[in-house]
Amino acid sequence: MTGPTTGGHPTGRGLLARARSGGWLAALPLLVFYAVVFGGPAVMIVIGAFTVDGRPSLDNMERSLQGGYLTALLGSVRLSAVVAIAGAVLGTFLAQAVVTSRSRWLRESVLTASGVLANFGGVPLAFLWIATLGNAGVVTTTFGLDRFGWSLYNFWGLALVYLYFSVPLMVLVMTPALDGLRPQWREAALNCGATPWQFWRHVGIPVLAPSLLGGVVLLFGGAFAAYATAAAMVGATVPLVTLMIGDALSGQVLVGHQNVALALSLDMILVAGLVMAVYLPLQRRSARWLR
Amino acid sequence: MLSSRFSTRTRFAGLAAALTVAVSFTAACGSAPTEQAGGASASKAATATSAADLGGMDALIAEAKKEGELNVIALPHDWANYGEIISTFKAKYGIKINEENPDGSSSDEIAAVKSRKGQDRAPDVLDLGQTFALSGAAEGLFAPYKVATWDKLPDTMKDPNGLWYNDYGGYISIGCDAKAVGTCPKTFADLLKPEYKGKVALNGNPTKAGSAFAGVFAAALANGGSFDDIQPGLDFFKKLKEVGNFNPVETTTATVEKGETPISIDWDYVNAQYTEDFKDKGLDWQVVIPEDGKYASYYAQAINKDAPHPAAARLWMEFLFSPEGQNLYLKGFARPALLQAMEADKTVDPELLDRLPKVEGTPTFPTEEQIKKAQEVVASGWSAAVSG
Amino acid sequence: MATLTPAPAVLPDTAPGHGPGGRGRPRTVRVWRGVVLVIAALYFLVPMVTAFVFTVNVPNVGFTLDAYTQIFTVEGFVGSLSLSLGLAAATIVLVLLLLLPAMLAVRLAAPRLKPVLEVLCTLPMVVPPISFTAGISALLPWAQDVLAPTPFYQTIITIQDQRFPLILVLAYVVLALPFAYRSLDSALTAIDVRTLVEAARNCGASWPRVMLSVIVPNIRTGIAGAAFLTLALVLGEYTVARLLGYVPFPVWIVMISGSQAQVSVAVSVFSLLLTWALLLAVSSAGVRKGSES
């Protein structure tokens, strides 16, 4: 079926033109699906966010960016940023340690365990840490940590707990990328007289950059949207926007505050949009290096 | 060649799309039924406002048995003895009970009613916090119904049209593990003592959990506040945090047993249940209703207007408000709404009555307006109070 | 684990540092690796062990496995677990069917779609599940009312069917997109998609043939990775299912814990171990398949 017009030249204009139109078609099922299943609820969130007593209004959005809500939003951003960066660094080190080991057993078990723990959270995770480092926790009492004024129930304690699902996620993201870092590159660099630090700085990290950035964004999103663990462990002592949303949407106290909660949800989506707006150009730049 | 390749690609995409659509169509096709399934007798039960409307209790029981099922939601087994209530009802009438989301909240219940309108999965009966009962009634979600013992319910404990009715309630109490703590606190003032550092916890956030909100209200009453002024309650917890006694962990049976939350402010029936549960586990859980801050609240029952099993729903209500049902609540350390009437009738079980945590006086309740105002104050002030 | 690595070039797996850089380096690397692994082990295992000890050490009774045996005696174990596995399978299939053509299209023909795809596949991670569910709960009754006179009404009802709620599959696909996208993306990056497709098309392969016989086998590890991550997600997803009123495995596991402290912690430990076992099974199946090719 091959004809003269189907020359293998990748820049053959005819082939590309036909492929381009087909490209959009092939992506169509995903786009349509997304528009309905994610877009639908998202539209309902937007509608709710801009409705007060059945009438369109900016009230909810304004309220959601003031006072306690603003503190909560900023608190969430701060916590997510800390967890994302710490998790990215620690996760990458752990991934590297696993990737460079010769033990297949270690690799398998760490990667599967990462898959499990990346989805672990909520009240059980909170209890794990309360039992270990809480005021009456095993480690706390064994080492007498309360004498040093240790408390798990603050911003840093929560960040420590959030790492429990963030580091595994980073391991999952970085392992394929680290595998793709060919050993020959390192050998070549060393042959040219580079120190390991120089190798990482000029070869390793730039090559890993797209995956690193992607991982940071993923970790940020995960920490940003987390809710049940914080609710069970620190309550409102650490102001977080998801707690406010959960209180209003699924509680026993606040009646009729749904729309403010939806406005807060919209705020979260906007923050995510900002993060993506910063991330995408960075990612494009770093990926260009690989071409 | 060109055209065939084009059409292959298009064909493939089109085939995929067609397949997806075809599958969804064959799986489910058909517009809404124009008539509700059931027939004359079902709709009769759906609009019955008392057992008399259906021809008496026996007719109601027969109708309910015909329906055969009841959908309940957010009824934990260890909360006010719902576990035994459910199994007793099942055994007595042979009606299957579909339990959903036992740790759900009142807003989850209302959301379920709204989002599953017209489906078989919709909840039939609801057990709601007072404010949700009021708002749900205002939104027209409930069916009016007056149980056989309707007249015995105090007027303050029911909606005049029968849309909701209080079933059980309790006071805010301080539960404490005497083995771990030594001397247990007896009042809100006691809670500030330095020996309780890091030990005092609530059952959640007052912006979300009903008992925690009530705890703040009780603290307000203990510190010079009133039903109109909940701010002293917020100030109390701020002080509690400042002296280091406040433990932000949400109390659960696991945290209590582990010893992380040896002092818990919660409903008296919840704390009293802990005493039972932990007797064999080495904890000496004592329950005290603080003299300086007495705050009581009742939950309310309501029937979903579009209940898929209307007769079973009404039978459930009759059961809950019969002496048998109310005594079962009492067995779970909750104060039944019909308590006064039952004491007069001597239908109350005196042994169970004796086990209730002691309290003086009769409870007074804030009005809907006062509660709304308090909620706003807590919603905007709680985070600032405890995160400082 | 082979399932997550892109198909590497055929070269011996030499650990970095084994070059002419010096003998000392391998030892430093080993020490550093050991330190990292020990710290990670402490961090992840100590809380687990603490929780496990709590479940088997009942005060006044001593060591007992009661909390775990109770899990199996409560009804609903098999039902909820098979529901979760079924939902996971359906989610995996749907995710792959939707993502693969789109990602290929982006690489081959519509590079401008790439940022769009990136955003779409990261957004679900930022929306808290509770808001997403609130949106769904608001959408469903509205859709029911609007679609009542059309044949689509029954579709909306069927996807909410108790026995196999397709609505959960749809929600899970959205939640799984970020993970699946990253996995497939790194796999597709590692192979030269353009050249492969050009070569196959030159040999006269139709598009379906290209997909099935050329692309898929080469990104087998990426697909297995996406499947693996989706399975883990579905077995751990709790909020959406609970709020919509269904009882797959994670929801059932919280429901049965009730008021008993040991059982409630035991069920989480158990569910973690079970998920881990299932994932190990999936990944070793992937390894075996990989080594056969």
Image (cartoon, rainbow, N blue to C red):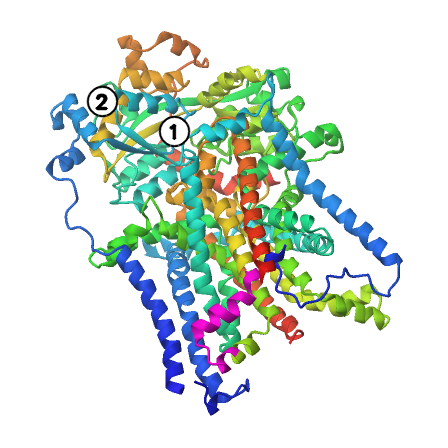
Residue B383 appears anywhere in the view? no
Name the residue that disc number 1 marks. Answer: B366
Q: Which residues are magenta?
A: C200-222
State the image coordinates of residue B178 (x, y, percent, origin top left).
60, 16
Which of B110 and B364 lies nearest the eye of the viewer? B110
- Which quadrant holds residue B30? bottom left
- Which quadrant holds residue B189? top right
Q: Is residue C216 magenta?
A: yes
State the image coordinates of residue A208 (x, y, percent, origin top left).
68, 65
Q: Secondary structure at mark 1?
A: loop
Question: Going by the image, does B27 lie left or right of B275?
Answer: left
Residue type pointed to by label 1: Pro
Parent chain of label 2: B
Quarter of the image with the N terminus of chain A in it? bottom left
Q: Is residue A2 magenta?
A: no
Q: Which residue is rendered at x = 75% and y = 30% of the image? A: A143
Q: What is the chief secondary structure element of the magenta stretch?
A: helix
Q: Secondary structure at mark 2?
A: helix
Mark 2 neighbour density, 10 Å: few (under 14) some (14–19) many (20 or more):
some
Q: Which residue is rendered at x = 70% and y = 43% of the image? A: C41
Question: Going by the image, does A288 lie left or right of C204?
Answer: right
Name the residue that disc number 2 marks. Answer: B150
